[in-house]
Image: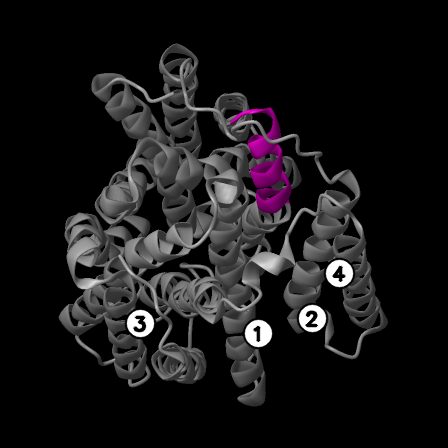
């Protein structure tokens, strides 16, 4: 059953609004972290859990929820996610301490995971394969718009009003998303046509436990040391759970991840991997550049947001164009160009200095945003064109999962590298508050750590480009 054109567009706009809300909150939270740390007397390493807890929750829930949405319906999951996002945001605006705020952000992230797991699948079912690149590009524009307003409006709200007002604002938007979902998703095409699929409860539990233990290993390792007993224990636990998950998936008749879908499909595997590596590299910039502006240059939240703003504008403007262009030129070619541009931007950022003009930083962030816009929508279109409709929900969750884990790993590894470099120069691996006296040597050590991160991520991007080119996957638009 297909929806009338008008209703179909309303459904699409509702999905975009949900995507916008999630991205808006994440970008604004990046700017809010130093302010929250001051209010609750926490250091910035503790405050970064506002982002890491969100990524961890989304990473753990995307695949199970994506599979569950294929079974019970995407409308129910999407509406429940919007309500959960509203509840978490409203409670976050009332949080009396850092610990309670972190818990409420986990609730919010669970709602974001429910909406993200369904978003690509809903859009893919609404439009034909010939138009998916264009609509995925428009959806990516919602990501850019969320980034724009999260950095600009979010920065203004935080500096001139209060960070609590930020979360109250996003809660109101998610409440609107919930009402639109209940009103206009009534005749949404079924997730599966005649399929009698059983939800893999055991597989879902195992994948959640694996992701939690693995990402915790990545985040606590730099704090406690990689040879610490608790770090080694979580690492061993994550490996064992992952092996149990693989064993279970190969034995159950209705697996959470059907690995046979990747058999003989190198292009599909590389496209999913490329998304993971892309966001791993770019998240290091999104994390470190704001801290560089705050720590090394002494900018406030509003100015940091304004410096990052042009890159978000580029994403919003270019994403619909590159998505539509990929429908004609080819998804693989367009995505590969995006990867190449991101690699160049990372290489240039590896020369970052305290004396680097701000306008150059803005241009490099804009270059990175251009590469992301050229990659994301075409890559999603290519993946969704290679899987059956009955698995749209699963692969929608998988694409979002690769992005979220990539972001988490990028932030965790970037923090670890900077901390190691600063420790080698005799400085503690912490970012001082805005009122603390900072020596030029301390700033230089932090900047050197940032440059090393960008070099490493640039090499990863180069390997990504070469693997996609040499494999020559046959992916059409």
In the depicted structure, whether residue 409 falls above or below residue 132: below
Q: Choose the circle earlier in sequence order: 4 or 3.
A: 4
- Residue 60: x and y in percent read 64, 48
Pointer 1: what residue? 416
Mark 3 to mark 2: distance in Å?
Answer: 29 Å
In the rendered structure, find residue 221 and report the number of the disc placed on it. 2
Residue 258 lies left or right of residue 201; in this view the side is left
Residue 24 lies left or right of residue 308; in this view the side is right
Q: Choose the circle earlier in sequence order: 4 or 2.
A: 2
Query: Callout 4 environment at 10 Å: few (<14), some (14 to 19), or many (20+)?
Result: some
Query: Callout 2 environment at 10 Å: few (<14), some (14 to 19), or many (20+)?
Result: many
Q: Are marks 1 and 3 in contact (CB under 8 Å)?
A: no
Query: Callout 1 environment at 10 Å: few (<14), some (14 to 19), or many (20+)?
Result: many
Res. 151 visible in picture: no
Q: Choose the circle earlier in sequence order: 3 or 2.
A: 2
Mark 4 to mark 3: distance in Å?
Answer: 30 Å
Q: Choose the circle earlier in sequence order: 1 or 3.
A: 3
Q: Is residue 68 magenta?
A: yes
Pointer 3: what residue? 339
Of the residues tagged 4 and 2, which is closer to the observer? Answer: 4
Q: What residue is at 33 percent from the left and 31 percent from the top? A: 126
> Magenta segment range?
61-73
Q: Is residue 287 magenta?
A: no
Q: Secondary structure at mark 1?
A: helix
């Amino acid at each position: 059953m297909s929806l009338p054109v008008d209703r179909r567009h309303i459904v699409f706009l509702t999905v975009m609004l949900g995507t916008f809300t999630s991205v808006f909150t994440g970008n604004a939270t990046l700017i809010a972290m130093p302010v929250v740390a001051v209010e609750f007397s926490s250091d910035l390493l503790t405050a970064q859990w506002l982002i890491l807890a969100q990524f961890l929750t989304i990473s753990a829930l995307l695949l199970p929820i994506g599979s569950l949405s294929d079974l019970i319906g995407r409308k129910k999951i999407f509406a429940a996610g919007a309500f959960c996002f509203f509840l978490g945001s409203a409670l976050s605006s009332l949080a009396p301490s850092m610990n309670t705020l972190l818990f409420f952000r986990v609730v919010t992230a669970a709602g974001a995971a429910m909406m993200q797991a369904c978003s690509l699948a809903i859009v893919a079912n609404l439009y034909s394969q010939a138009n998916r690149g264009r609509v995925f590009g428009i959806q990516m524009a919602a990501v850019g718009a969320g980034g724009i307003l999260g950095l600009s409006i979010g920065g203004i709200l935080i500096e001139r009003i209060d960070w609590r007002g930020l979360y109250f604002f996003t809660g109101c938007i998610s409440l609107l998303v919930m009402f639109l979902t209940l009103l206009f998703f009534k005749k949404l095409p079924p997730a599966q046509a005649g399929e009698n699929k059983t939800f893999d409860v055991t597989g879902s539990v195992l994948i959640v436990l694996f992701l939690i233990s693995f990402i915790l290993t990545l985040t606590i390792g730099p704090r406690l040391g990689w040879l610490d007993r608790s770090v080694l224990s979580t690492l061993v636990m994550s490996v064992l759970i992952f092996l149990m998950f693989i064993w279970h998936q190969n034995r159950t008749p209705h697996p959470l991840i059907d690995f046979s879908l990747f058999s003989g499909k190198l292009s599909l595997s590389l496209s999913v991997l490329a998304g993971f590596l892309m966001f791993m590299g770019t998240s290091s910039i999104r994390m470190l550049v704001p801290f560089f502006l705050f720590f090394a240059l002494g900018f406030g939240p509003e100015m940091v947001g304004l410096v990052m703003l042009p890159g978000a504008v580029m994403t919003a403007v270019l994403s619909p164009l590159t998505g539509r262009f990929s429908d004609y030129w080819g998804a693989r070619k367009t995505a590969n160009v995006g990867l190449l541009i991101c690699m160049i931007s990372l290489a240039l950022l590896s020369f970052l200095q305290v004396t680097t003009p701000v306008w150059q930083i803005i241009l490099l962030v804009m270059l990175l945003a251009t590469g992301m816009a050229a990659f994301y929508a075409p890559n999603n279109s290519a993946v969704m064109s290679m899987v059956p409709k009955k698995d749209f929900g699963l692969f929608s969750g998988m694409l979002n999962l690769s992005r979220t884990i990539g972001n988490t790993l990028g932030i965790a590894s970037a923090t670890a590298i900077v901390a190691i470099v600063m420790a080698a120069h005799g400085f503690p691996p912490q970012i001082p508050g805005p009122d603390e006296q900072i020596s030029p040597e301390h700033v230089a050590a932090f900047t050197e750590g940032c440059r090393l991160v960008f070099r490493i991520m640039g090499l990863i991007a180069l390997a990504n480009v070469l693997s996609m080119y040499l494999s020559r996957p046959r992916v059409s638009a």
